[in-house]
Amino acid sequence: MAAVKVAVTGFGGRMGRALAQALAQSEAAALSAAVVRPGSSLVGADAGEVAGLGGNGLEIVDSLERADFDVLIDFTAPAATLANAKFCADRRRPMVIGTTGFDAAQKEELLAAARQIPLCLASNFSTGVNLCFKLLETAARVLGEDADIEIVEAHHRHKVDAPSGTALSMGEVVADTLGRDLAQVAVYGREGQTGARSRDTIGFATVRGGDVVGDHTVMFLADGERVEISHRASSRLSFARGAVRAAAWLAGRQPGHYDMRDVLGLK
């Protein structure tokens, strides 16, 4: 079977390079287009050389109009991702989205595109993180009514949104399992005389600094014991390999909204 042709937007960024490396290691998918923003100094450069893989003859372009692909992988920014989703929906091209920081209206716009194309939207494409989501469902069912729940995440100094999309997804998994509305029970940081903690709340704490790729810990704190479920990423390749796996899985699927747990068969 021929490899799925994959375009990568935001190719000049850290995730773009990691995706190129993951695609180079994949037998199911291959890099067919490397896209950067208009005006980038990388336009016209050899994608393999930019990714540190050696020349491959693939020229970096500044528009999806110039890209040949079966599936698009997008780890950029909300406004750019929405524009790319419209492009893909108009042309019936599947799309894998790892961008985070969408507001409610933007997420609705993305889900509208999923009525026309298969769209895999995930806050984190790491296999380990998605396994943690499954473990969190079990922990919440067993411990959630008798424990205080806190989520701590850490990322590098350049991350622009907080809490991370992964931390929010972890909170959503726990809240949904317990029949709570995360929007009503989330507490984002504490300061001053906050009063006693309400058992129903789910707390979030954010750390930013250095070159931390991504650390997440969910704590279930009961009287006399606590359980922690943690994931620590040491390389962006863990996310990139998952996104490439999702791209290969998405090719040929029916239109709809999928996530990484669909790809891994964890639902």
Image (spheres, helix red, strand yellow):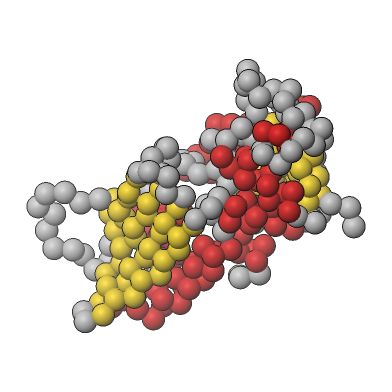
- In the displayed orientation, state which residue is furthest to the left: 193
In x, y percent, where is residue 175? 39, 64
**Which one is in front, 19 or 37?**
19
Image check: 208 left or right of 20? Answer: left
**Which one is in front, 130 or 154?**
154
- In the displayed orientation, state which residue is furthest to the top: 39
In x, y percent, where is residue 6? 76, 44
**As drawn, 261 above or below 25:** below
- In the displayed orientation, state which residue is furthest to the front: 54
Question: Residue at coordinates 51% horizontally, 71% vertically from top-left?
Answer: 134
Task: Please identify the quadrant where the N terminus is shown.
Answer: bottom right
Residue 26 appears in view: yes
Q: Quadrant of residue 217?
A: bottom left
- How many marks overall? 0
Q: Quadrant of residue 131?
A: bottom right
Question: Residue at coordinates 62% horizontally, 45% vertically from top-left?
Answer: 18
In x, y percent, where is residue 255? 73, 51
Question: Residue at coordinates 69% horizontally, 43% vertically from top-left?
Answer: 20
**As drawn, 214 above or below 130:** above
Question: Residue at coordinates 54% horizontally, 65% vertically from top-left?
Answer: 128
- In the displayed orientation, state which residue is furthest to the right: 1
Image check: 107 left or right of 41? Answer: left
**As drawn, 221 above or below 70:** below
Image check: 238 left or right of 207? Answer: right
In x, y percent, where is residue 159? 43, 40
Task: Please identify the quadrant where the C terminus is shown.
Answer: bottom right
**As drawn, 221 above or below 59:** below
Residue 122 appears in view: no
